[in-house]
Image (cartoon, rainbow, N blue to C red):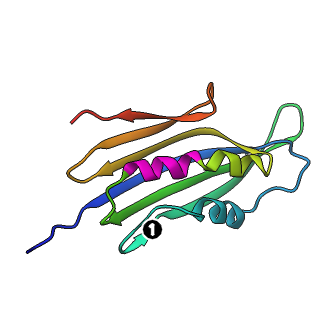
Amino acid sequence: MFKVSRWTHIAGIIRIDQIPIRIPQLSEEAVIAMFSENAPRGSEGGLTFHAVRTQVIEPAGFPAVWGSISITGDLRDFDNYMKVEEWLQGLPPKLKEHQALIRNAVINIDVEYGPCVVMVWNPRTDDFTTIDVPP
């Protein structure tokens, strides 16, 4: 019997701040390693991460760092978007260990022939909120 592959397409961006600024700053490699740990995988591979560290001088005269990390992937034979949610929910505690936090985030998760959801960071609850996208 012919089996059709089922794909889950993921695209998102997470903006990170690291406070206080006088501590050792995370490298791009360290952030990618942190996000890669236990990240969802399909039968042909996992997610791709790209970290960009920025530094902005605030009006008070001190630098504000960190930056953002983009997340993309096409996961073959993976159709459980709730596993992606669980993985995302595990990121804030990991960041907190390094005095870092999520400032903004939006991640689109589209399961072929299934649900499509958008996860948005809610700074009021320090948690991700999942929004179902209507068919």
In-front residue for pair 108/56: 108
In-front residue for pair 1/119: 1
x then y, percent, for residue 88: 54, 48
Is residue 120 positioned above or below 88 on the image? Answer: above
Majority secondary structure of magenta residues = helix
Is residue 132 positioned above or below 29 on the image? Answer: above
Residue 135 in sight: yes
x then y, percent, for residue 3: 15, 70
Residue occupying image coordinates x 32% and y 49%? 110
Q: From the viewer's perspective, tell me whether residue 60 is left or right of residue 73.
A: right
User: In the rendered structure, which segment of residues is drawn in magenta?
Assistant: 81-89
Residue occupying image coordinates x 68% and y 60%? 31
Q: From the viewer's perspective, tell me whether residue 39 is left or right of residue 11.
A: right
Q: Residues within 10 Å of mark 1 (few under 14, many from 20)?
A: some
Q: From the viewer's perspective, tell me whether residue 85 is left or right of residue 42.
A: right
Q: Mark 1 points at which residue?
A: 46
